[in-house]
Image (tube, rainbow, N blue to C red):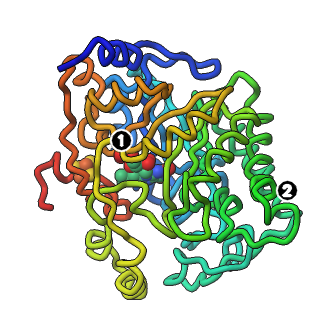
Amino acid sequence: MTTPNDRAALDKCFSTARLNGLTLRNRIIKAGTFEGKTPGGLPTAEYTELHRRIGEGGTAMTTLAYCAAENDGRLNENMIYMDDYVREPLTALIQTIKTTGACVSGQLSHAGGFSKNKQLSTWMPRGPSFGLNRLGMAQGMFFSLALSKAQIRERVATMGRAAAFMKSVGFDAIEIHFGHGYGLSQFISPITNKRGDEYGGSLVNRMRFPLEVLAAVRQAVGDGFPLLGKISMSDGVRGGVSYEESPLIAEMFDQAGLDCVIPSDGTSSMNPMLLFHGDSILPGMLRQEKNLLMQIGLRAVGPRLFRYYPYRETYLIENARRIRDKVKRGSVCYIGGVSSNESIAKVMGEGFDFIQLGRTLLFDPDFVKHAQADAAYVNGCNHCNLCATLIEAPGGIRCVVREGGER
Ligand SMILES: Cc1cc2nc3c(=O)[nH]c(=O)nc-3n(C[C@H](O)[C@H](O)[C@H](O)COP(=O)(O)O)c2cc1C
Ligand code: SF4
């Protein structure tokens, strides 16, 4: 039964909202879910169609996941990077999505020292410190090398240049990826950042590079352009970023001018199931993995890496509340396990400004239309996470349950 409070919360969700200079038709944003539909770094027609359908279904803004800042910022060679080679198709893709009335955000990312990109311009990827490159082992890229200070300055400038490019091709907003164990979060995490200079050690020092990136991006796009930032509330391993530290991280980004904090959780490199909750992606990944060395590695570390976190609705809300309480200037976008109007009402009722949806929009691109039409709407995604195992499959991801495919 919908209470008057729930009704008010749903009304809040499904009416227009402002994000810096941008008007959104409601408060639902498609989360970045790398779809694997950019072979060789170029978007396919299926990629356009997936996001166009999500726009048609009433979502206020969709996010093109993992837009690498440069070639060396890609996890692999099948991701787009922000350079002139992709200007035309990317502009056309964004324009097509916008015909539905949806806005388009791009997730500005860098792999740092976690990469298996065969087209890397250097022999090993670079991050904050020397360490293992867990993703590149099977490609012979065993290590991540430490960036020099001059290279840090160069990378900051690269991120700013990429942001200017993104604005020029028509993105309405940029979501900077500060989480999940990728390049920027490698600096925030005390596990991957062992530097002894002003970029390592205390939280203030570990935040220096990400804050410099934020400043460079802001400088590139101007004050009136919406900037969101996705963070991890924890690395998910002992000695990493903790739930105690992440509210301070959110506060620092907020004070530095980020318009919206998105508190996600976990790291692709150290504890990926914290992002998703639900069924482990390990069996599916083993089925998809063609590289024998990777298979052996996955079998060896898989059970420890892919821990089990049972799915429950709004599974990140307890820790996300601590982020919401620290963010005073900008807004907070809740992410993680929203699949019904009941959950939307709960999240909105607790004072979050926006909601990002990942899997539920892959299951039903008409989520928003359906939720607006039926107060009792419940999305049918069963959190099997099979979509996430198809990221590197030919054609990329799809909801196999929706398609009636085998589990
Ligand atoms: C197939 C798939 C790919 C994903 N790729 C990304 C990504 O590229 N960047 C990112 O920040 N999060 C990624 N995620 C995580 C989602 O953005 C989101 O944090 C997670 O799915 C939880 O939200 P949900 O419960 O609404 O699905 C991915 C998730 C899925 C299912
Ligand atoms: S495959 Fe479909 S049902 Fe399974 S988690 Fe992905 S979107 Fe949900």
On the picture, is 126 further left or further right than 392?
Answer: right
Answer above or below: position of 192 versus 217. below
The label number, if any, that marks residue 172 in the structure image: none
Rendered residue at 76%/46% (across/down) = 211
* Residue 107 x %, y %: 56, 44
User: Tag 1: residue type?
Assistant: Thr
Q: Position of residue 374 (x, y in %)?
A: 19, 20
Residue 332 falls in image quadrant: top right
Q: For the residue marked with disc 2, what is the amino acid?
A: Arg
Q: Toward the viewer: 191 or 397?
A: 191
Residue 328 vertical position relative to residue 253 in the rendered view, above or below: above
In whole angstroms, how far apart are the C-alphas of marks 1 and 2?
39 Å
In front of the other: 324 or 258: 324
- Residue at disc 2, secondary structure: helix
Q: Splitting the image into 4 quarters, where does residue 255 fall?
A: top right
Q: Quadrant of residue 288?
A: bottom left
Q: Residue 153 has which mark?
A: 2
